Image: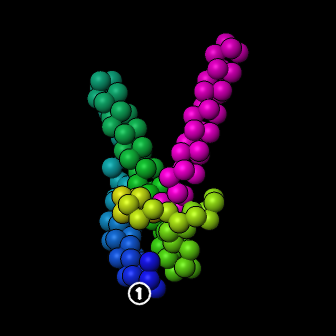
Amino acid sequence: MTQTSSIHESNKFQGVLEALIGELERVVRHREEIAVEQTADQVDEVQRASELALAISNLDRQSHRLRNARAALRRIQEGSFGICEQCDEGIHPKRLAAIPWAALCIHCQEALDNNRADTNRAATNFIRDAA
């Protein structure tokens, strides 16, 4: 990849990330939907608790994406965007096109995901065995 095409790609990803950050900041700002309201009806309270849990989960997911997008924008500014933070290899352009905030190449991400799955399995087994 030439210097010019690399700069063009970085500019393209910077624009995508800035738009995403703007959208996520608007979503995260509208947190009033998670306000706790008391109702006299127990069925309504159960429904509201379910809606509240979903809203909190969505807010957490959007906040996480916002942090990742901001980190990717910093990597563009620092000149390390598109380089895996684990192995220092290039992240495939198709992966960046799909997930512009990706900090790991697909191989390192898969290894991390497998490690998390193993840890979750071990924790589940430990809890099950302890009961």
Please tell me which residue lies in front, 109 or 35: 109
Residue 77 on image: x %, y %: 52, 80
Q: Is residue 63 above or below residue 40?
A: below
Residue 49 on image: x %, y %: 37, 33
Mark 1 element type:
helix
Residue span colored magenta: 102-131
x 63%, y 16%: residue? 128
Query: The C terminus appears in which quarter of the rendering?
Result: top right
Q: Residues within 10 Å of mark 1 (few under 14, many from 20)?
A: few
Residue 12 on image: x %, y %: 35, 76
Q: Residue furthest front?
A: 1
Q: Is residue 53 above or below residue 125?
A: below
The residue at which mark 1 appears reads as 4
Please tell me which residue lies in front, 33 or 72: 72
Query: The N terminus appears in which quarter of the rendering?
Result: bottom left
Q: Is residue 1 above or below residue 125?
A: below
x 54%, y 58%: residue? 104
Residue 69 appears left or right of 116: left
Q: Residue furthest bottom?
A: 4
Residue 61 appears left or right of 107: left
x 42%, y 43%: residue? 57
Q: How is the image coloured?
A: rainbow
Q: Main secondary structure of the magenta part?
A: helix
Any magenta on residue 76?
no
x 38%, y 60%: residue? 94
Q: Amino acid at mark 1?
A: Thr
Residue 66 on image: x %, y %: 44, 62
Q: Is residue 131 above or below residue 48?
A: above
